[in-house]
Image (cartoon, grey):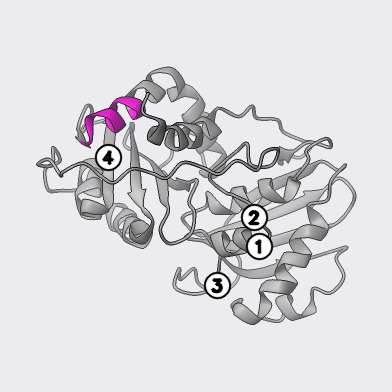
Amino acid sequence: MNKATLPIVARLRSLQAAIRFAAGGARVIAEADDRNPLAQLLRAANETMLGRSLQFDSAGGPSLTLDVSGRRVLRVTAAPGLAGAESCLGAEVLEDEHKDDLIKLMQAVATPRYELRVTSGPIGRGGEEVSVGLPVALLADLVLIDLNDLAADDSAEEEEAVPAPAPERPSAAAPGAGLAGLAEAIGLGLQAWLIVGGPDDDRSNGAEEMVSHLQGFLDDEREAVDRQLDLLSPEPGAPVCVMLGATLIEGHSILVARLGGGLLLGIVEGECTGAALAAWRDVLT
């Protein structure tokens, strides 16, 4: 395997994580012995592309509810048991001046030695514009957490850089709606992708080695991927689109989209995540 592809494979493996639910249906994202539950909180927020409300509950008592969209924290809607939440709660949209207070709230709810759970629901008050709010990647950078590297909590090793894209091949997607239409709408920013199942089954584009890794992962883990997506959708099998493992502007993300019985898995340039979100909304309308 090309060493430069290892970070992408590592991000895909985040979908294989065992799922455990607490009483009431909340998903456990950090166990009591997790060395860095804050990293798990940030990764949960970073995987949210469409607008959702994420309620994080610590077994120690505190709770923090955030409106998240496009991998940005838009606002704080509730913070029972957390001191110093007034400035964030009073903001209709979080801005740069709120980042330090928000980080303190996240650190207070994601404390070591306590189980951390998340419950996802419809977005709270206001809209879900992705041009506002605080980027999750920025918050992670400020607390020295690598969102891409699942081993970063236990290791200081730096992640290999994602290789430059191979020359673009003619797209296999035809114009139109559906997952193939989504891939075409995102354009060159979707560097490698494939679709499994549904009317666009077996369409793909991009560097052969990258597509091969995506295919191999889905061959083994399609059911696990669907289970994870069901946690973020209103009902099993419903359309859903998420981003995994994004870094700052120069980073790459993994796009996972489910629609009409098909699943699209692709690698998106960091600067094109906004285009991916817009394309997904167009597909749904």
Along the polypeptide, which appears first: circle 3 or circle 1?
A: 1
Q: Which residues are magenta?
A: 206-214
* Magenta stretch holds residue 208: yes
Q: In the image, which is nearer the foreground, mark 4 or mark 3? A: 4
* Magenta stretch holds residue 198: no
Q: What kind of element bears circle 4?
A: strand
The amino acid pointed to by label 3 is Gly
Q: In the image, which is nearer the foreground, mark 3 or mark 1? A: 3
Q: CA distance from mark 3 to mark 1?
A: 11 Å
Q: CA distance from mark 2 to mark 4?
A: 30 Å
Along the polypeptide, which appears first: circle 2 or circle 1?
A: 2
Q: Which mark is residue 192?
A: 4
Along the polypeptide, which appears first: circle 4 or circle 3?
A: 3
The amino acid pointed to by label 2 is Leu
Q: Which residue is mark 2?
A: 54
Q: CA distance from mark 1 to mark 4?
A: 32 Å
Task: Tell me if 172 is positioned left or right of 82 in this view.
Answer: left
Q: Which residue is mark 1?
A: 66
The amino acid pointed to by label 4 is Ala
Q: Which residue is mark 3?
A: 133
Task: Tell me if 263 is positioned left or right of 174 in this view.
Answer: right
Residue 113 found in image quarter: top right
The amino acid pointed to by label 1 is Leu
Q: What kind of element bears circle 1?
A: strand
Q: Residues within 10 Å of mark 4 (few under 14, many from 20)?
A: many
